[in-house]
Amino acid sequence: MRITVSGLPGSGTTSLSRYLAQRHGVEMISAGEVFRLCAKEHSMDLAEFGHLAEQDPSYDKMIDQRQKEIAAQKDNIIVEGRLSGWMVENADLKIWLFAPIDCRLKRIVFRDQIADEETAKKITLEREHCEAGRYRAYYGIYIDDLSIYHIILNSEKWNVDALGAIVDIAIGQLTAHARPA
């Protein structure tokens, strides 16, 4: 089963993806982690690296293409990333996680060790704006078009175990219907 987990920064996509990968014993690949690693390798913060990617589309396209290739080669995989629902067209289950900005900022401050929420808000909104422009320019994708997703969940409402339990039910239903009677 191919599953994609997408959402804006701080919505909990990585946490849910790790939960699902561990629970179901499948591999997970994450565009965000690759992007953060590249930013660090270039001694840049995410916003700076985002601007570099804006100037040179090869960074984004390389990450997106690599995810797409890996997902196509695997029958059982969790693909986490903002565009994974769009890139893995043959996914059996596409999930979008949503959380209000204040919730996401608290998580981002903790995760990225940013000094305060105001700084996190400035960085995050700039990053989101930058990414949305690149996605439109590169692929014609509007990141706020959620019509491709099978499940949309508010991650502020539930912790990762509760979100995982909801998705586990969906996976169970999909696999039950895939088996011959």
Image (spheres, rainbow, N blue to C red):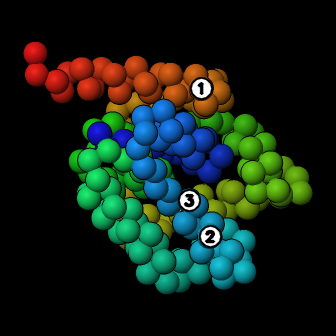
- Total numbered circles: 3
Marks 1, 3: nearer the viewer: 1
Q: Earlier in the sequence, mark 2 or mark 1?
A: 2
Give the amino acid type for the residue marked by disc 2 in the picture.
Leu
Q: Position of residue 26 (x, y in %)?
A: 41, 44
Residue located 27% across and 26% down the image: 174
SS of the residue under disc 2: helix
Q: Which image quarter is the C terminus in? A: top left
Estimate how packed mark 1 is, as few (under 14), some (14 to 19) or many (20 or more) residues with alpha carbons within 10 Å: few
Residue 4 visible somewhere in the drawing? no
Q: Give the labeled residue for mark 3.
A: 32
Indicate whether 47 appears above or below 142: below
SS of the residue under disc 1: helix
Residue located 52% across and 28% down the image: 164
Q: Give the labeled residue for mark 1.
A: 161
Q: Is residue 41 left or right of residue 17?
A: right
Q: Earlier in the sequence, mark 1 or mark 3?
A: 3
Residue located 49% across and 66% down the image: 133
Give the amino acid type for the residue marked by disc 3 in the picture.
Gly
Q: Which image quarter is the N terminus in? A: top left
Q: Give the labeled residue for mark 2.
A: 37
